[in-house]
Image (cartoon, rainbow, N blue to C red):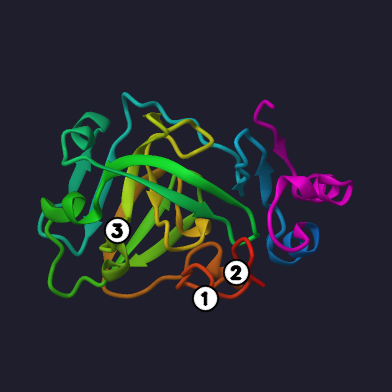
């Protein structure tokens, strides 16, 4: 199947027409109607992924891309893709769980742990939160420094042995396997280090800011209700 971009109504229509085999868990058509905000579109690529967008997939020139790290830091940074690939590399295999009920098992990720990414910038003592800005404006989300320091959190550059594709967040995306996928901001171009919490896009639509698997509102994984 080629990647397909669907509006919310069309996406729910496919599910209602009998696409229950695409997902795990409870009736996804009912749940999707309850939890997907208006205006969200879905991309249906291969290997079980469903990717939701609010403005469509951005086009990013890798030669001009810079990841900005600013805010409450000793040294603001502007990092190219080459700069990022020179930082300590981390690799892992982990599952991805969407709050709407589907999962992709054993995803191979490679990238940079947030502690390594932030080391040169030097967060100030009063820093508490990381606000991630996507090139899919106005998509943002926030993690605490403590959350971003869990062992399997990373800023990913590669997936399944290859650089991220555009639907999966090229050139950089957040990976938080212990949280639901809406915390995994794609197309990240800025990390703003903050003292205070700012709700992200999905939180403004009623989702929990602490999106731990199986513990947040709306959330479940295969076999859980």
Position of 198 with respect to 78 (left or right) is right
Residue 143's x, y, as percent?
A: 36, 65
Location of residue 170 by image quarter: top left
Residue 187 visible? The answer is no
Question: Which structural element holds mark 1?
Answer: loop
* Number of numbered discs on residues: 3
Position of 18 with respect to 74 (left or right) is right
Residue 216's x, y, as percent?
A: 54, 74
Residue highlighted by disc 1: 215
Question: Which structural element holds mark 2?
Answer: loop
Q: CA distance from mark 2 to mark 3?
A: 27 Å
44 or 131: nearer the viewer: 44
Residue highlighted by disc 2: 219
Q: CA distance from mark 1 to mark 2?
A: 7 Å
Residue 119's x, y, as percent?
A: 12, 54
Location of residue 130 by image quarter: bottom left
Residue at 11% in and 59% down? 122
Residue highlighted by disc 3: 192
Q: Contact, CB < 8 Å: mark 1 with mark 2?
A: yes
Please, is residue 162 above or below residue 217 in the view?
above
Q: Quadrant of the N terminus?
A: top right
Marks 1, 3: nearer the viewer: 1
Magenta part of the protein: which range? 1-28
Location of residue 67 by image quarter: top left
């Amino acid at each position: 199947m080629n990647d397909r971009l669907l509006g919310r109504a069309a996406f729910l229509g496919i599910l209602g027409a009998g696409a229950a085999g695409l997902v795990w868990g409870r009736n996804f058509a009912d749940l999707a109607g309850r939890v997907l905000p208006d205006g969200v579109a879905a991309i249906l690529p291969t290997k079980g992924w469903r990717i939701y967008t609010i403005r469509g997939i951005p086009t990013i020139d890798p030669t001009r891309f810079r990841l900005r790290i600013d805010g409450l830091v000793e040294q603001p940074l502007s990092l190219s893709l080459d700069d990022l690939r020179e930082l300590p590399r981390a690799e892992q295999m982990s599952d991805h769980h969407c709050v709407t009920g589907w999962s992709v098992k054993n995803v191979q990720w490679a990238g940079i742990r947030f502690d390594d990414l932030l080391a040169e910038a030097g967060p100030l003592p009063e820093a508490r939160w990381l606000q991630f800005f996507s090139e899919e404006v106005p998509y943002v989300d926030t993690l605490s420094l403590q959350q971003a320091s869990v062992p399997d959190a990373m800023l990913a550059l590669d997936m399944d042995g290859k650089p991220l594709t555009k639907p999966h967040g090229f050139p950089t995306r957040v990976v938080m396997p212990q949280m639901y996928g809406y915390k995994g901001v794609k197309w990240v171009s800025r990390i703003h280090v903050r003292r205070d919490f700012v709700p992200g896009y999905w939180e403004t639509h009623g989702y929990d800011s602490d999106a731990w698997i199986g513990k947040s509102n709306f959330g479940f994984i295969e076999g859980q209700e």
